[in-house]
Amino acid sequence: MIGINSSVGTTVWLAMLAVSLGVPNAHVAAQSANNWICVGGDRGCSRYSSLSQIDRDNVDKLDVAWTYRTGELVDGKGRTIECTPLIVDGIVYVTTANRRVVALDGTDGSVIWEFDPMSAGPHAGPLASGGVNRGVAYWSDGVAEGKRRIFHGTSDGRLFSLDAETGRLDTNFGESGVKDLREDIARDIAQLGYGPTSAPAICGDVVILGVSNGEGPAIAAPGDIRAFDVRTGRQVWRFHTVPRPGEFGNDTWEGDSWQNRGGANAWGGASVDVDRNLVFVATGSAAFDFYGGDRHGDNLFANCVIAINAKSGERRWHFQTLRHDLW
């Protein structure tokens, strides 16, 4: 059982009751019930574990086995930890309030490695949503002694690929292990808040990101869903959550009101149906969420659940829960 003390934002603790986090083969993580390979447990985010040693009859007997302190709380001020840790082959992967990634030994809480995104250069741009981070993603090529990666998206607009064993950047990915997410976007968003705040999703050899972006009256970065090759960092596809002219749904925006439109973003991440190669995202309101007089129409794909082909980025279906959302 993993817990986060979010009231102070500095502590990760693990309580165990005769539970072993290790597995015999360190490279069959996705097949082991002992692992929690995504924020939602599995790729589909079912948040279910078949482990049975801890149940309602003995949960009150758990004791704290170890405590890891981030050391980031200074003078009682600091961000809260909002991540859901991963557990893969007995290793706990967690992000701190300052967006560092830490790999911990699940048996005693000792640090195996740490990665600070600031070590790979300064912020790419302004921090979206105050710089919060809710976790990382795990990928393996499925080969014994093969490649295993931790993908870390940061709210300044960067995506990092880390060796899961060492925490070192994969230099084959992006630019020396870092993908600048402000690339591959036609217009200049260098000074706009843009970046993932929730953990990436994985489908096959593709890493999928939703982002946090502006939702106010000012010009904002796009809230598009984007996918990248896990080995190279190359953008595979980009789904326009505010459709362009000629795309399905553009006629739900009156005139040119679709242009430079913020919001309509999947800031909460994505879930995946691996067997059907589908990615599921839920989007928020289009900007400005307190005023809609400059965006008449149903405003697709704001306020939607969308199923997207994970290989091509094409819309399979959508369901809009609320048309022309206003608070």
Image (tube, rainbow, N blue to C red):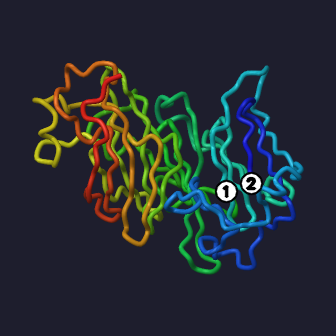
Camera sees residue 150: no
Which residue type does callout 1 highlight? Answer: Gly
Q: What quarter of the picture does the C terminus occupy?
A: top left
Secondary structure beneath label 1: loop
Q: Position of residue 42 (x, y in %)?
A: 56, 62
Disc 2 designates what residue? 113
How far apart marks 1 and 2 lie (CA) works out to: 6 Å
Q: Position of residue 309 (x, y in %)?
A: 31, 62
Disc on the earlier residue, 1 or 2: 2
Report the residue marked by disc 1.
167
**Spot occupied by residue 48 in the image (x, y as percentages of width and height):** 61, 60
Residues at discs 1 and 2 in contact (Cβ within 8 Å): yes
Task: Please tell me which residue is depicted at 16% across the width and 48% down the height of the picture.
Answer: 248
Tell me the element at label 2. strand
Q: Left or right of 176: which side holds 209?
A: left
Between residue 212 and residue 327, name the one nearer to us: 327
Q: Quadrant of the N terminus?
A: bottom right
